[in-house]
Image: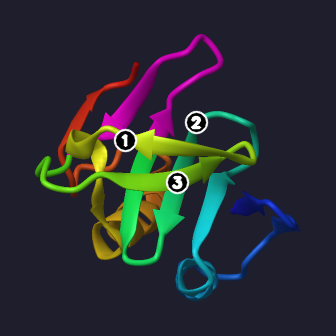
């Protein structure tokens, strides 16, 4: 599994090691984390800001994309490509739910079923 973030790429030995890395990033503020296996797609993207996340699943290079579906009660600003982006309230989920997605994705790279999804914009 390859993890790409603002300060470089990392290949963790286990999904647990990846989770520890993501939790450390969340303690520092915002981060954009791309997770993939042997090819660029599919990819799981975790936008994190402390205890909140917005997750994107990119199925292929043709633009098939899904966004996490949250409860719609909190607006959070994430950093995407070095730019601040305020996520729609209905896309924000907990960091713990985002980590469940990461564990599921690490097993089979399919769209994780542990959260609700909506079509990406």
Provide the residue designation for mark 2: 42
* Displayed quadrant of residue 30: bottom right
| Residue at x 37%, y 41% (from the top left corner) | 111
Query: What is the spatial separation of the Cα atoms under label 2 and label 1, in whole angstroms?
Result: 9 Å
> Residue 105 at what x, y percent from top left?
46, 56
Where disc 1 sits, the SS reads: loop
Provide the residue designation for mark 1: 111
Do the CB atoms of the residues marked 2 and 3 lie less than 8 Å apart?
A: no
Q: Nearer the viewer, mark 2 or mark 3?
A: 3
Residue projecting furthest to the top: 62
Of labels 2 and 1, earlier in sequence is 2
> Residue 84 at what x, y percent from top left?
60, 47
Whether residue 102 is situated above or below residue 61 in the rendered picture: below
Do the CB atoms of the residues marked 3 and 1 lie less than 8 Å apart?
A: no
| Residue at x 65%, y 18% (from the top left corner) | 61
Where disc 2 sits, the SS reads: loop
Whether residue 91 is situated above or below residue 118 in the rendered picture: below
> Residue 99 at what x, y percent from top left?
40, 71
Provide the residue designation for mark 3: 78
Q: Quadrant of the N terminus?
A: bottom right
Do the CB atoms of the residues marked 2 and 1 lie less than 8 Å apart?
A: yes
Query: What is the spatial separation of the Cα atoms under label 3 and label 1, in whole angstroms?
Result: 22 Å
Q: Residues within 10 Å of mark 1 (few under 14, many from 20)?
A: many
Of labels 2 and 3, earlier in sequence is 2
Residue 20, label in figure: none
In the image, residue 52 lies in the stretch drawn in magenta: no
| Magenta residues, start to end | 56-69
Q: Nearer the viewer, residue 63 or 95?
A: 95
Q: Residues within 10 Å of mark 2 (few under 14, many from 20)?
A: many
Q: Is residue 108 left or right of residue 101?
A: right
């Amino acid at each position: 599994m390859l993890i790409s973030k603002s300060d470089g790429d990392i290949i963790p030995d286990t999904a647990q090691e990846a989770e520890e890395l993501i939790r450390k990033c969340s303690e520092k503020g915002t981060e954009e984390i791309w997770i993939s296996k042997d090819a660029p797609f599919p990819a799981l993207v975790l936008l994190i800001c402390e205890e909140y996340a917005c997750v994107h699943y990119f199925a292929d290079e043709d633009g098939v994309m899904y966004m996490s579906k949250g409860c719609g009660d909190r607006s959070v600003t994430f950093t995407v490509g070095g730019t601040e982006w305020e996520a729609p309230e209905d896309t924000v989920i907990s960091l713990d739910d985002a980590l469940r997605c990461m564990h599921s994705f690490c097993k089979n790279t399919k769209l994780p079923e542990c959260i609700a999804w909506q079509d990406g914009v």
